[in-house]
């Protein structure tokens, strides 16, 4: 079955938004992911919010190539959460016709986190995007079971979602049965990469791998095949492989093409 592929931000982090779209078009992707909001203050991002010229350039690249924007990053739900902090991100997503916004949960108070996730879904609803909660073992949403519990506790809003990243599957207590337990309607896309699997890594080691040292599918020992066999066979795939050492010796275009070529065998049947 033919898959839909999105070039994730981390696979094209060297690109401005319009450049990422052009690279995706040149290398066989139908969508891109853009990080328009940093994952921490001062962290890397693609600058578009509040820049009308960059938005026009990005929209023009979409029109010229036919490549869409799948997901935007990132909203983090912490203790002092106000969903309107990201109003500019919602507006940009609507303009770009993005399908999803990636959400991370940082509040250890699960009841409050659940309530705020429900508030986020409500605020995002008019913009036509899903709020996809990604479990990451160093955050308050450590595994797939936790993500599903939060979404259900929020009342399973119509735009709720759970994002499965192969890296976090391989480094959390999440099982294939946990993946199969996620209702199909909550799955909008999944992220593919590889790494050394296990539960012994420190938070600092896990974050380092996630942000700068992922492996191409097949180069690690995460059960990537088992994971994508357990996920719906029509699920769009976000190819998310950042490896700063490997990328230093290759162009963005060649890296994007290699990431896609190494991903295809695990998700196409």
Image (tube, rainbow, N blue to C red):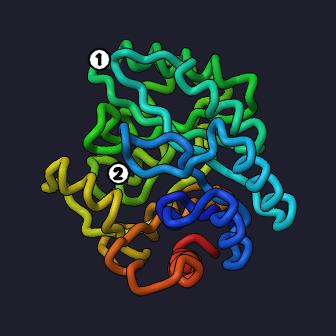
> Residue 208 location in percent, x, y?
26, 58
- Residue hosting label 1: 109
Callout 1 crowding tier (Cα within 10 Å): few <14, some 14–19, many ≥20: few
| Horizontal side of residue 45 vs 7, given as left or right | left
Vertical relation: 9 (above or below) 162: below
Callout 2 crowding tier (Cα within 10 Å): few <14, some 14–19, many ≥20: some
> Residue 181 location in percent, x, y?
48, 42
Near-viewer residue (66 or 162): 66
Q: Nearer the viewer, mark 1 or mark 2?
A: 1
Residue at 28% over, 44% down: 137
Residue 22 lies in what quarter of the image? bottom right
Q: Quadrant of the N terminus?
A: bottom right
Q: Which mark is residue 175?
A: 2
Q: Quadrant of the C terminus?
A: bottom right
Vertical relation: 221 (above or below) 153: below
Residue at 37% over, 67% down: 223
| Horizontal side of residue 110 vs 216, given as left or right | left
């Amino acid at each position: 079955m033919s898959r839909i592929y999105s070039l994730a931000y981390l696979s094209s982090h060297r690109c401005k938004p319009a450049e990422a779209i052009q690279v995706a078009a040149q290398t066989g992707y139908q969508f891109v992911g853009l990080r328009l909001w940093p994952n921490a203050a001062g962290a890397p991002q693609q600058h578009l919010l509040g820049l009308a010229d960059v938005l026009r350039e990005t929209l023009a690249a979409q029109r010229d190539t036919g490549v869409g924007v799948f997901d935007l990053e990132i909203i983090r739900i912490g203790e002092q959460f106000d969903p309107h902090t990201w109003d500019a991100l919602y507006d940009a997503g609507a303009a770009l016709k993005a399908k999803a916004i990636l959400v991370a949960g940082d509040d250890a108070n699960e009841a409050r986190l659940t309530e705020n996730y429900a508030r986020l879904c409500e605020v995002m609803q008019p913009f036509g995007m899903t709020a996809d909660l990604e479990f990451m073992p160093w955050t308050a949403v450590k595994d797939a079971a936790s993500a599903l519990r939060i979404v259900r506790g929020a009342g399973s809003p119509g735009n709720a979602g759970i994002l499965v990243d192969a890296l976090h599957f391989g480094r959390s207590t999440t099982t294939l049965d946990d993946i199969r337990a996620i209702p199909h309607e909550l799955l909008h896309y999944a992220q593919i990469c590889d790494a050394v699997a296990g539960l012994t890594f420190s938070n600092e080691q896990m974050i380092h791998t996630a942000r700068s040292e992922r492996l191409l599918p097949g180069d690690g020992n995460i059960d990537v095949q088992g994971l994508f066999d357990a996920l719906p066979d029509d699920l769009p795939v976000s190819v998310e492989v950042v490896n700063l050492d490997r990328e230093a010796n290759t162009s963005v275009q060649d890296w994007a093409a290699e990431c896609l070529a190494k991903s295809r065998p695990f998700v196409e049947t």
